[in-house]
Image: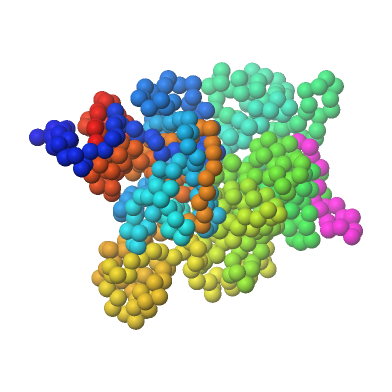
Amino acid sequence: MGRKEENIKKAQALLHLKERIRNIGTAAHIDHGKCVSGDTRIWVNGGWTRASDLWDRFATQEPVSNPHGADVRNVTNASMWTRSIEVPSGDTQFAQISHIWRLKATEALVELETRDGRRVKVTPEHKFVVASGHHLGFRDAESLRNGEMLAVPRWLPSLENGNEWLELESEILTRLASDARFLFELDGEACALLGVDGKIRGPTMVQLCERAGIPLHGLYAHIRRVTYRLQKWKTKSASPMNLPIRSSLERTFRFLGLLYGDGDGNGFLHGADEAILAEVVSTLQALVPRPAIARHPPRVPRVEMRSKTLLMFLHVVFGYPLRAKARTMVLPEILHRAPLPLAAAFIQGYLDADGGVERGRRAVSATSVSADFLDGLQLLLLRFGVRAILMRRKSSSTLYISGKKNLQRLPQFHDSEKLLSMRALGAKAGPSYVVDLVPVNWAELRTSTWKSRMYAHLEQKPSPASLLSMVGPDLAEVEPVLNDEVAFVEVRSLRRTKEEYVYDLSVPGPRNFVAEGLFVHNTTLSDSLIAGAGMISEELAGSQLFMDYDEQEQARGITINAAIASM
């Protein structure tokens, strides 16, 4: 007897048991009652994209027919990948996104905040990966309580395909060429290929490349200089700049990090460290003609790039703010997909300028009036396996990096004094009590040593290293919480909020994805209803796909043939 026939027989038997009948009916498979808000950032292909922006990219495609009143698009051919966790094993993997959904919000959402400062808004029935002792399972948002521990990603690996540097060069040119105020001066070879003579504006250059079948990154090395010039008649051009060559990109990104830390809206870098000022002038000399150190006592010295073109280059490519820089700056989105050494150079530059070592807190810290910038930096650090802690305040916020594991993985200071302090801190550091401890149910383990008995008596959570020294023959029992790519953080707060639209993703297989630095689950609603009627267990809800009989339905996580269950 096939699976379909077995389920029909089970349903027929249940119909005669009055105590098991519920006034619930469902047609087909309601896969997407679990949704996130539109401003939720989803980790896709190594970067972060807001759910509403992701939807907008595919909104004009042919809708997928469904019985739920939802807008659905099939995005399988877009080759979009996220990170997922297997439950109950705790293993992590890449998983492909097959569909994106948009629905009208019909109830208030739950805004969850974790103890390390991550926030996400979801529908009440949206499930998170929760640790119950050393076992992993799913629990919906409205059932969560403060203090419960969520499994969250500690490390989000880069999607490396060998073309990261070419893709970065293409991204830089794409952003520059989208602004018609930039003029590009090409070398003789490129002029011959495109059939031009002299300077051309960005949109024209893109059109000519498309006609000639030349990728933008193939043109990068052939651009002699770039000039910023308004399109008004008889407007004088700014002084030109050279595009940073590949061998100097790390120095350029480090300069950018320093500028985000100690720069202003004019692109001036302020600081008293003469070594850093001289280093920045050396970096700028490869880009612009006349950088210099300006001294106006009693103010601290500053480096002036003296190039409107370079300032606008930083604004257009990286989003560097030109006004109210301290309050309006956000982390450059390009850093999430840039080659890892460049992201590390930016972090190093920023921490050299704005970071410090707090011996009292045993942490490296950075404070800013822009919580949005630190929020982005916290997500960027996941590329390095660093799970930082963001403390949000009205006047200013602070990002803390604590715990031996995090300090070892953090890009090192270049500033010698800060570097020595950080190394001294790392030598004495233990685990972070916020992100480095793992949940354990001691009643299920053999506490054969004095240390394990002490932890069990005090009901304490150990670090992974401490747990390994105590479990002995019970190692297999605790393996789900020992994955180095996963951390566990407590729920700090839960509150209600409202949104007009909500969004969801279909992720066949593990059926969860990373949103705002957390694992969230796109559980199927019909499985949950059937579990409530006692036809399948709560643990299987969301993975059983009870009403998907066809093998293709199971594999793709969608309904092809409609089914009806009465409970």
Looking at this view, is 523 or 17 the one in front? 17
For residue 102, above or below residue 352? above
Image location (x, y in percent) of residue 191: 65, 23
Query: Does residue 285 appear in the picture of this structure?
Result: no
Looking at this view, is 489 or 379 the one in front? 489
Residue at 49% across, 45% down: 110
Looking at this view, is 135 or 17 the one in front? 17
Image location (x, y in percent) of residue 68: 38, 27
Extreme bottom residue here? 450
In what quadrant of the picture does the N terminus appear?
top left
| 349 in the magenta segment | no
Extreme front residue here? 18
For residue 453, above or below residue 352? below
Residue at 33% across, 74% down: 470
Extreme left residue here? 1
Q: Give the range drawn in magenta.
A: 293-309
Image location (x, y in percent) of residue 484: 41, 59
Looking at this view, is 86 or 289 the one in front? 86
Tell me where residue 422 sits by quadrant.
bottom right
